[in-house]
Amino acid sequence: MSSIDLFQNPLRRWGKHKDGKRRPTVLVKELRERDRRRMVKHFLGLEDSDRLLRFGTVLPDEQVANYVNRIDFSRDMVFGVYNRVFKLVAVGHLAFAPRDESKSAVTDKERVAEFGVSVSRSARGMGMGTKLFERAAIHCRNNDVDTLYMHCLSSNKTMMHIAKKAGMEIHRDYGEADAYLKLLPANPASMLQEALDEQFATLDYTLKANKRIAAKWFDRLLGRK
């Protein structure tokens, strides 16, 4: 047994996947400045084909790092999923911008939001992309944003699946796709749900971080590198 397995996360809940196998519940955490280094590592770990789907082009490492380093956490929201060994395996970026004329037909709010998501190859098939989208949508609801956009390549099956599952209106043109979802206004239930989701995810994050620290200490104690 490896040292990492000696510390079990009591928050881990399991449910059945469509293939009959059990999967851990996906807990989505709001990311902050302290997570930026792990975000860079996550994006740099994406293969060229995944970078193409995420950014619409195959960005080189330097531009990927610049993208992460330019994210303004005071304006945008970034959500993530950490696996059991405290590795960031999924990231959803919710970018806010003032409404422009092209979007005036679908919203009269002051701001609109655009969502982008990436999931590491090792963590796919667990519904992380959908959970990140749901977390982004409820945050928009609770912050007076009633329209959520996604822009991607038409060949991005994951994003298309998320869009269709959410009931988004999709427009395709020249190999690209734009999708938008009209959101309900906030209510006490949506406010409570977002607060509880973040509390559980924060506790899960803390347990995984402490587990990682304890595992490193245990390895050093045994003379492992």
Image (spheres, rainbow, N blue to C red):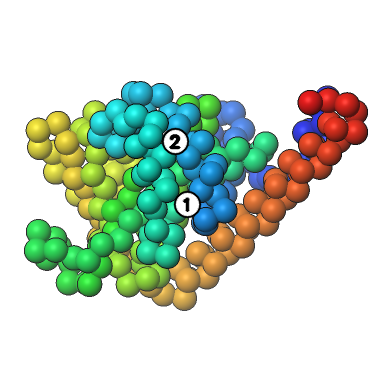
- Is 224 situated above or below 213? above
Please give the residue where the numbered disc 2 appears in the rendered image.
43
Quadrant hosting residue 174: top left
Residue 182 image label: none
Residue 79 image label: 1
Left or right, 164 with reference to 137: left
The quarter of the picture where the C terminus appears is top right
- Evaluate whether residue 124 shows in this view: no
Number of residues whose C-alpha sits closer than 10 Å to that of mark 1, classed few (under 14), some (14–19) or many (20 or more): many
Alpha carbon distance from label 2 to label 1:
14 Å
Residue drawn 14% across the image and 63% down it = 100
Q: Going by the picture, which residue comes out furthest to the bottom?
A: 188
Left or right, 133 with reference to 218: left
Q: Nearer the viewer, residue 112 or 33?
A: 33
| Label 2: element kind | helix
Whichever of callouts 2 and 1 sits on the residue coming sooner in the sequence is 2
At label 2, the amino acid type is Phe
Q: Nearer the viewer, residue 119 or 222?
A: 222
Q: Going by the picture, which residue comes out furthest to the front?
A: 62
Q: Nearer the viewer, residue 126 or 221?
A: 221
Q: Nearer the viewer, residue 133 or 18?
A: 133
Task: Give x and y (percent) for residue 130.
Answer: 42, 44
Left or right, 21 with reference to 61: right
Residue drawn 30% across the image and 28% down it = 58
Residue drawn 70% across the image and 47% down it = 209
Q: Are marks 2 and 1 in contact (CB under 8 Å)?
A: no
Task: Give x and y (percent) for residue 164.
Answer: 28, 42
| Label 1: element kind | strand
Left or right, 45 with reference to 97: right
The quarter of the picture where the N terminus appears is top right
Please state which of the two labelled residues, at mark 2 or mark 1, is closer to the viewer: 2
- Evaluate whether residue 23 shows in this view: yes
